[in-house]
Image: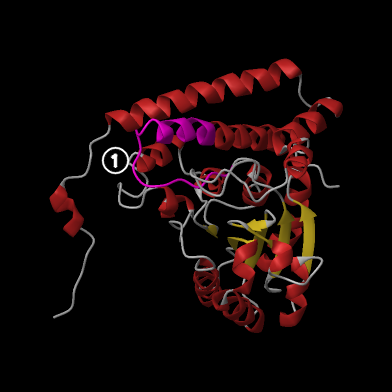
Amino acid sequence: MIRPPRESLVRMYQRMQQIRQLEEKVYYLFLQGDMPGTLHLYIGMEACAVGVCENLRHEDYITSTHRPHGHAIAKGVSLKAVMAELFGKSVGCCGGYGGSMHVGDLAVGSVPAIAIVGGGVPVATGIGLSCKMRKTDNVVCCFFGDGAVNEGAFHEGLNMAALWDLPVVFVCENNLYAASTPIAQAVKLAHLSERAGAYGIPGVTVDGNDVLAVYEVVGQAVERARRGEGPTFVECNTYRLCGHSRSDTCGYRDREEEAEWKKRDPLLVMEENLTEAKLITPDELLGIKEAVAREIDEAVQFARAGQTPKPEDCMQHVCAEE
């Protein structure tokens, strides 16, 4: 396995802690009625976003889903800007217009998330076409869930990207359930990555709870895309350690299954990898956790102090043809 430098490992663990702690914080803030809208948490899937985005440059792009907080943070959107957006404040990363399902910041290559299942796939293909036409070596990583692989947009986007050898890495976060529908009831395949063969592109399945495994596989796909060799389909097998949305009690899931996946919590996996390799001490891990906790508290304070958009602001960024 390719092991990134210690600096990258520490940053990856920090990012995973930022995502986990932000999600845990906003869960309670939503329950308290402090935030508008709904909420789709990323708890348990942090290794996917972080392992992918650690391979990307500032000027590369990602597209996201209705579960976007982790993707945005992993790509570099600030905790304060994400938190403020969840509060619906003008200082949020999308000016308070998007909320939980539409976070992002083009300044760091994080395209504001698209809540339509599979909707980000053709957008990523379009961005990839733009990169190729402009003759850059930028790459697009497109996140989507297992529920998206049966959407027409998925097939159309992959087919076009394959035909034109576009620099797109399609990242399927297979958390076994499309809302409450088990993947086995929707797809008759052992691995969703097998779909790649229908388009003549590489497909690979990786342990989505091991950030180092994700980093290595996606790193190879990103370099392939930069060389102009076209797209790759990467399936990250993972598991959300929470409901589909804030009202979901997971009555459709087996409790033994949940217990087994909790043993593979991606943060625990990385902590074990780092300490066993003597790359970081338990005290250093604790220091990172505590520092992130302070960052989260500062982000909440920043968001609470932010200005709420005025009613007339709804007419901004709107255009109409005569």
In the rendered image, which quarter is residue 201 located in?
bottom right
In the rendered image, which quarter is residue 196 located in?
bottom right
Q: What element does badge 1 sit on?
A: loop
Taking the image as shown, residue 180 lies to the left or right of residue 99, namely: right
Type of amino acid at the residue the image marks with label 1: Lys
Residue 289 location in percent, x, y?
61, 23
- Residue appearing at x 34%, y 39% in the figure: 87
Q: Is residue 28 magenta?
A: yes
Residue 70 location in percent, x, y?
55, 45
Foreground pick, 151 / 253: 253
- Residue appearing at x 46%, y 36% in the figure: 79
Quadrant placement of the C terminus = bottom left
**Magenta residues?**
22-42
- Residue appearing at x 68%, y 31% in the figure: 10
Foreground pick, 208 / 164: 208
Residue 105 is at least partly visible in this image: no
Residue 133 location in percent, x, y?
52, 77
- From this view, report whether residue 242 is shown above or below residue 191: above
| Residue identifier under label 1 | 89
How many residues crowd around disc 1 within 10 Å: few (fewer than 14), some, or many (20 or more)?
many
- From this view, report whether residue 95 is shown above or below residue 303: below
Foreground pick, 178 / 277: 178
- Residue appearing at x 39%, y 28% in the figure: 300
Count every numbered label the image shows and give the total.
1
